[in-house]
Amino acid sequence: MDTQWPRWEVFKQDTPHKPHQAVGSVHAADPEHALLTARNVFARRPQAVSMWVARAEDIYAWTKEEIAQSQLLRAEHDRAYSPPSSPRKYLVFRKTSHKRSMTFVDHVGEVEARTPEEALAQAQTTFTDAEALAWWVVPADKVYQTDPSPDTIESWFAPAKDKTYKQQQFYATVGSHISKHKLGRGVEDD
Amino acid sequence: MTSAVKEALIAKLTALADDEVILAHRNSEWTGHGPILEEDIALANIVQDELGHATLWFGLRQQLDGSDPDRLAFFRDANEYRCCELVELPKGDWAFTMLRQYLFDLYEALWLEAARHSSYPPLADAAQKIIREERFHLQHTQAWVERLGQGTEESNRRLQQALDMQWGYAQQLFVPIPGEELLAAEGIVPDLARVKEGWLEHSTRHLQNAGLKLPINPGYQPTSRAYHTEHLWSILAEMQSTARWDAEAKVW
């Protein structure tokens, strides 16, 4: 018997005007549990204002190469999924750069479509401002978000702004989040 | 502030800090042994937060009597500690640890809510600062109690066992320390009887919704923070050994 909990992809939003970005994954038993662990794993230090989680198996993903080689249909057949007849909302995510060490896939918007493949086709014609290295589409009702109330933002995300942390490359160095320096509040080094 | 009030406040801050230090150290025993990596990280986060709270309480005490927080944590013997017995108990299984953390988080969140209105501004400010992360801790442990309680027969049984064991110990959180009535009368700390009302109401509802039975006989209920379980000696021996081994060391 597989006792492993399902894997959830985590999307973190740093400030209200930035897109949600894929930051990694967690294993969890259910959506609420996934959000709780995601907050612990990905938002303890640098700041965040919102998080989304979606089961990895609910995410439809294609790389530029896969699309170029028309592997779309084959990928589709790997999934046990029967498309609903009426259109539903999909969230669209796009990766546009190899530059960052973490695989950032940014939320770019929503489309209405009957199947994930249709959602991809729509995304390709809708979001044309940058070349896509990879696309992810997720049915909107499969994405779970943190409570947007100010109270939750205050208790889940605000404390991280005031915390110091050890730098990965220089473990003896204790620093604080970059936003503190921008505000001119200086380094907490004690 | 009269000297009697000051003395009582020093004792209260010490009790608050000691609960956090010992519970944090106890839970740190899970580091590397959590049931799943994500929960291992989550509990380590909670531990660090609780240690942060201890630092704040010791810091407030330092303002009153100039004591050194590191000396208090690492060079006091068990007889001088003023933690409650609940936090000393061995970590047990995951159900035991999650239930204890839940009972403690609920108490702490409610106490802090009330303490934000303290007439002693440094205490009100500290409560305001740490209530935020305490609310998150509570959501996390609350979720675990619900899932273990309603999970499998085994998880329910383990959680029920933990509750039968801890319920009486948890009542000590609401036993005032000597002199605490002076502090409550001046509005410096919340009235523990009021905090207990809220705690009983919330915990009873949540535990019953999770499919647990509140113990009819609460069992042993410790009443004085001057007494401790045998477990405090061994946890302090481990926690303090490095500091005591080379007390002059500037860097570890």
Image: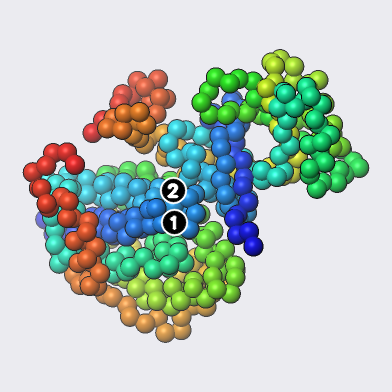
Side of A4 where A135 appears, left or right:
right
Q: Colour scheme of this structure image? A: rainbow
Instruction: Please state the horizontal and vertical placement of residue B160, each as a whole percent of the image.
Output: 49, 75
Residue lying farthest top?
Answer: A129
Residue nearest the viewer, comparing B158 with A187: B158
Residue type, numbered disc 1: Gly
Q: Quadrant of residue A136?
A: top right
Callout 2: few (<14), some (14-19), or many (20+) C-alpha neighbours within 10 Å?
some
Image position, residue B123 (x, y; %) = 28, 48
Secondary structure of residue under mark 1? loop
Query: Residue B34: which numbered mark, if any?
Result: 1
Q: Residue at x 43, y 67 (%)?
A: B93
Would residue B27 be found to the left or right of residue A121 on screen? left
- Is disc 2 in contact with disc 1, using a CB cutoff of under 8 Å? yes
To which residue does mark 2 refer? B41
Q: What is the residue that sits farthest to the right in this orientation?
A: A85
Q: Is residue A53 left or right of residue B121?
A: right
Parent chain of label 1? B
Q: Residues within 10 Å of mark 1 (few under 14, many from 20)?
A: some
Which chain letter goes with mark 2? B
Q: Residue furthest left?
A: B248
